[in-house]
Image: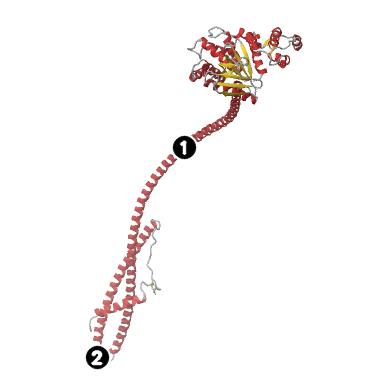
């Protein structure tokens, strides 16, 4: 933190203290007093006309902080030199702001301790306005204060206090910090004097850049005597006083990069010796013990090392490091927040997409539900239709079963009829066979009758011939007459035999006629039966075609039509008839 930034913090407190109504603006008369006081404390020539000239175009009323800054930079801060007492400057600004902002009720510290805390606040606060101190610097200050008071730091207590701060306000103002320390929140059980000494020690360390302080013996340059002095080590200076109250300063040891500090052996009854060698002088110093000696040597060497590289004091450097670290963390946090915003934006986009997808899914689900409802409705309708069809099919099946049963019964009847027709067919065949046999017998009888008639005609012709011969023989002689008589008798006996034979043939013919009539009657019955069976077959829708017997050879044609027998059968029958005739003829 540079000199300008350090001065601006204190001036900001003074400016805001003059803003009584908290409007952000201060009257010109008050700014004149503030500017004159700043110039006086910082040893800058004051030019009251410059202030009037600077604000001559702004006659409407009070001046804001932004309006006062150009004048402050141009006429005061640009001219400031580091040749003034900063404590006087800070006290002047503190006097202006403490009167308005400091609440002394319930405070366990004095105004001087409050001023020191205010200075520490300005040192540790962030370089942005309004001024605040973040929790990390609060913890750093309270740790220092606790160590200075000789107490132990309780991390849990501070974490509880950090948790009490609101999430968006992890920081304190100067007056809140003074109230926090002044009410003894972190110094319970400590005496006020101890708290005041701790505040002073931290003030000296942080504000006055006191790196180390304590009593040591110093050897004089002129009288070479050893005198006890109170030494105060700062980054570029070692001051020594008569006492620790710093009332009487005896001198300074100016440090630079060319200085060195070395340990000395014990001599002249003095122990723990070391000397500081500067460009113009050398100083011999005796510490109280070896530990203090080593601590002082190390602290002085650290200051010299920092001066060699041109770096600031360790506390300022530590503060810069902490601030840079916070800035890096803040940058990382901002980057993380940016990334989080991007992720949040992407997440919102994803959420919108998911929402759109969810809506689509809901619509799809609704559509699916509707489709499922329609499908179920269709399925129910199909099931109803299927049940109706099944019922209809069941009824049809029952009807079919009834029809099948009926058809089965009809089939049984039909089969019974077929069996009856087959039986009738067999009977018809038998009748046809009987008819054929009757026809054969008729033909045989006809042939026999024909032969008998032929034989009878021949016998008649023979008898007539014999009668003629007999008549002729009558006219012959008596002898011949007797002969003829005998012959006649023989002829008569033959004639009688022929007549008997003729009678027999007539009887046979009569029997054949009777047999023929019987056969004709059978044939007529068979024809009637055949006709009735034909009618029955035709009545049964022609299921069976009647098979009539027929000859496989050419039929014989007679005078009465087609013969019932073939020539070979007729010859066999004739032969059989001749044999029966010969057996039946009486012997002569």
Q: Secondary structure at mark 2?
A: helix
Whole-number angstrom distance, CA of label 1 to CA of label 2? 129 Å
Q: Report x, y in % for residue 532.
A: 35, 59
**For residue 465, what is the image quadrant?**
bottom left
- Specify whether residue 203 is in view: no
Q: Is residue 272 above or below residue 196?
A: below
- Identify the mark nearer the N-term, 1 or 2: 1
Q: Is residue 222 above or below residue 588?
A: above
Observer-nearest of 233 and 451: 233
Position of 21 with respect to 442 (left or right) is right
Q: Which mark is residue 103?
A: none
- Check the picture and name the quadrant holding the C terminus: bottom left
- Disc 2 target residue: 483
Q: Residues within 10 Å of mark 2 (few under 14, many from 20)?
A: some
Observer-nearest of 331 and 119: 119
Q: Is residue 209 above or below residue 534?
A: above
**For residue 423, what is the image quadrant?**
bottom left
Kindly give the residue lying farthest to the left in the view shown.
587
- Disc 1 target residue: 381
Observer-nearest of 391 and 359: 359
Observer-nearest of 373 and 247: 247
Position of 578 with respect to 60 (left or right) is left
Here the colouring is: secondary structure
Residue at (45% x, 37% y) in the render: 380
In contact (CB < 8 Å): disc 1 and disc 2: no
């Amino acid at each position: 933190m540079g000199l300008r930034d350090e001065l601006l913090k204190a001036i900001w407190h003074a400016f805001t203290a003059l803003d009584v109504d908290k409007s952000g603006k201060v009257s010109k008369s008050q700014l004149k007093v503030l500017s004159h006081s700043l110039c006086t404390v910082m040893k800058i020539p004051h030019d009251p006309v410059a202030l009037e000239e600077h604000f001559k175009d702004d006659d409407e009323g009070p001046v804001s902080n932004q309006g006062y800054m150009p004048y402050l930079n141009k006429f005061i801060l640009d001219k400031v030199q580091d040749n003034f007492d900063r404590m006087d400057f800070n006290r002047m600004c503190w006097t202006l702001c403490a009167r308005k902002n400091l609440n002394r009720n319930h405070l366990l510290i004095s105004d001087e301790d409050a001023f020191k805390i205010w200075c520490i606040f300005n040192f540790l606060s962030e370089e942005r306005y309004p001024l605040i101190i973040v929790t990390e610097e609060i913890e750093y200050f309270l740790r220092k204060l606790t160590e200075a008071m000789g107490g132990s730091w309780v991390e849990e207590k501070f974490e509880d206090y950090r948790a009490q701060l609101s999430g968006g306000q992890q920081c304190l103002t100067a007056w809140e910090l003074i109230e926090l320390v002044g009410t003894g929140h972190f110094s319970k059980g400590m005496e006020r004097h101890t708290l005041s000494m701790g505040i002073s020690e931290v003030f000296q360390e942080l504000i006055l850049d006191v790196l180390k302080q304590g009593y040591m013996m110093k050897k004089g340059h002129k009288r070479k005597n050893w005198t006890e002095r109170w030494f105060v080590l700062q980054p570029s200076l070692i001051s020594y006083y008569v006492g620790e109250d710093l009332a009487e300063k005896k001198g300074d040891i100016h440090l630079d990069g060319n200085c060195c500090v070395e340990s000395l052996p014990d001599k002249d009854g003095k122990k723990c010796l070391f000397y500081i060698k500067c460009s113009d002088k050398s100083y011999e110093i005796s510490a109280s013990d070896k530990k203090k000696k080593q601590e002082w040597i190390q602290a002085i060497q650290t200051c010299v090392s920092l001066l060699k590289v041109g770096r600031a004091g360790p506390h300022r450097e530590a503060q810069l490091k902490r601030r840079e670290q916070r800035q890096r963390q803040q940058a990382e946090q901002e980057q993380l927040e940016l990334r989080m915003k991007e992720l949040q934006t992407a997440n919102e986009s994803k959420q919108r997409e998911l929402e759109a997808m969810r809506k689509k899914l809901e619509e799809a689900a609704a559509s699916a539900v509707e489709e499922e409802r329609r499908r179920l409705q269709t399925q129910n309708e199909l099931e109803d239709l299927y049940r109706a069809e099944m019922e209809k099919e069941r009824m049809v099946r029952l009807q079919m079963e009834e029809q099948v049963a009926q058809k089965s019964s009809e089939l049984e009847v039909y089969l019974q009829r077929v069996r009856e027709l087959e039986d009738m067919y067999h009977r018809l065949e038998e009748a046809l066979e009987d008819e054929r046999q009757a026809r054969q017998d008729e033909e045989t009888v006809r042939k026999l009758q024909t032969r008998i008639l032929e034989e009878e005609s021949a016998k008649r012709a023979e008898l007539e011939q014999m009668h003629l011969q007999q008549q002729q023989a009558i006219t012959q002689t008596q002898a011949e007459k007797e002969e003829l008589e005998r012959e006649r008798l023989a002829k008569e006996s033959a004639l009688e035999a022929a007549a008997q034979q003729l009678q027999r043939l007539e009887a046979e013919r009569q029997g054949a006629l009777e047999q023929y009539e019987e056969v004709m009657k059978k044939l007529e019955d068979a024809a009637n039966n055949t006709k009735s069976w034909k009618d029955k077959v035709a009545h049964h829708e022609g299921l069976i075609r009647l098979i009539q017997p027929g000859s496989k050879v050419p039929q014989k044609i007679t005078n009465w039509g087609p013969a019932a027998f073939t020539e070979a059968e007729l010859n066999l029958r004739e032969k059989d008839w001749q044999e029966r005739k010969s057996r039946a003829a009486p012997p002569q």
